[in-house]
Amino acid sequence: MSDLVRLAEEWRDQDPDPETRAELDAILERDDRAELEARFGAKLEFGTAGLRGALGAGPNRMNRVTVMRAAAGLARVLGPGRHVVIGYDGRHKSDVFAADTARVLTGAGLRASVMAGKWPTPVLAFAVRHLGADAGVMVTASHNPPQDNGYKVYWGDGAQIVPPIDREISEAIDAVGRVDALPLGDGWQTLGHDDIVVPYLRALTTLPIGDAREISVAYTPLHGVGGATVSEAFRAAGFEVPVMVSRQAMPDPDFPTVAFPNPEEPGAMDLVLELAAATHADLVIANDPDADRCAVGTPLPDGGYRMLTGDEVGGLLAEHVLRHTSGGDRLVATSIVSSSLLAKIAAAHGVRHAETLTGFKWIMKSGPGLVFGYEEALGYSVGSDAGLPVHDKDGVGAALTVAGMAAMAKRDGRSLLDLLDDQARRYGLHATTQLSVRVEDLSLIAKAIERLRTHPPVRLAGRTVESAEDLSQGVAGLPPTEGLRYRLSGDARIVVRPSGTEPKLKCYLEVVVPVEGDDVAAARARAARDLEDLKKDLSLALGL
């Protein structure tokens, strides 16, 4: 206990934040060993996703000391004279963490440019390349719960960092001493709306939006920072500005109307779907709180609306981009947990296809000529003959492109559902779903994966497991990553992996069903049954 007390007192004495100092004083006063162990028995590890965790005092929480140490580590890796762009979202303390980062970087002899507003993550990713910066920092926890915040680092190519840069920064962070001994500066540049948002919106006009504009959109930023930028983007492109869910329109770090501010979570889309029904909208669009992801919904023929899966939107956008770009050396890419449909679309259009590890940092490294990349978790980077405006997922650019695609379909008397049916007839119906298990004890995830690794299933839902690949050994030329992939008879696939940002075990299921006699509805019904059967058997095999 004495070691924990000493660590807590040392932390408190260097902490510039009166709130977290008071938090530690209260914990020390009541001699709360469990709370001290939770905060000082481990630390947030800096990796390819940067840092992400709950707000609070101690090295295992997001706070000003943790952020200043991260900034100091980044400064040591970059060196004096380098330029870093800093953005932040509307979460608790995001603006404070951004300012602390600027103080540490300028104090270490680097140049810092801090965005003047709470703008989307893709604006920051765009700014790194637009300004010719050496790195970027975005203070955001994306779609995590309200109590979390995070610290995402981009390199000079405008993409998220990958190994070995993450390891170099992590080692530099570990070498940082007390933050109250760090030299702090105050001479950073402030980037206004005209400096960076306007160039970003101008870059989005190069996307394959088409020339149809008659489309009505119901939209929500989910209490995040996307609302103003999306409205501007639609107006600049000549669309009618989306009708917005008023209760979710402004940034609010408490996310009062949703249990989790993630468009994929149950209930998160309820208000925007109600708005769509009330306004008879042609299209439903939602961003996550930092607006790097985009969720899409479309009307049903008999009333109501259906949210599309990330794989469905990914397939539609891929085909749309390939039809509206030219050149033979184009590349499309997605992750190993996303649908296999993209490979078939690429082959049909005579372009290259790449499969990467999970995460947009890997998709952006998939190779030259990349015009489209996506991951099933609602992340898309849409490009054109001019290239990719953003080297990361971009929920604003994706929203614009989907609106253009839906407007073109509407002009032809068709819908996004019709376009999905077209793809099912052409390539077979590729149906995907996810089995996600949230845990309090992270060791349960490791135990479940180890159980599958040592006792792999032989049959699931009546299908033979034809191959079992341990992704930690590296497969198909990919770097090693924790997870397992199974290929099943009857053209089915399962990938099991721990989430990189949340305490979840995620399982990604896909079945491919041929469309017989032009009956897409029957194929969808069969696929739904098959996926449900696979989920049931996989749940039993996991033991969670």
Image (cartoon, rainbow, N blue to C red):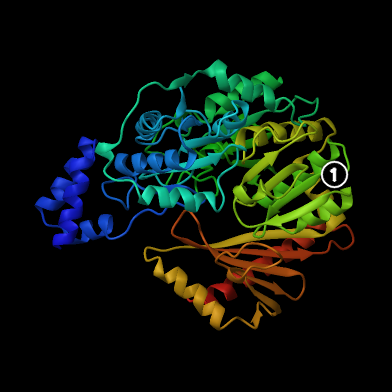
Label 1 sits on a secondary structure element that is loop
| Image-quadrant location for residue 208 | top right
Front residue (pair 442, 152): 152
Residue 266 visible (yes or no): no
Residue under label 1: 329
Measuring from the top left, give residue 409's x and y in whole percent.
80, 35
Question: Would you place residue 278 above or below residue 498 in this image?
Answer: above
| Residue found at the very far left of the displayed protein | 29
Residue shown at 56% from the left, 83% from the top: 455
Question: Would you place residue 175 above or below residue 471 in this image?
Answer: above
Q: In this view, does 399 lie to the left or right of 517?
A: left
Q: In this view, does 251 lie to the left or right of 211?
A: left
Question: Would you place residue 411 above or below residue 436 in this image?
Answer: above
Query: Within 10 angstroms of label 1, few (less than 14), some, or many (20 or more) residues?
Result: few
State the quadrant of the N terminus: bottom left
Measuring from the top left, give residue 259's x and y in whole percent.
42, 47
Measuring from the top left, give residue 77's x and y in whole percent.
47, 43
Residue shown at 15% from the left, 56% from the top: 5
Type of amino acid at the residue the image marks with label 1: Asp
| Image-quadrant location for residue 413 | top right
Measuring from the top left, give residue 75's x and y in whole percent.
43, 38
Residue 321 visible (yes or no): yes
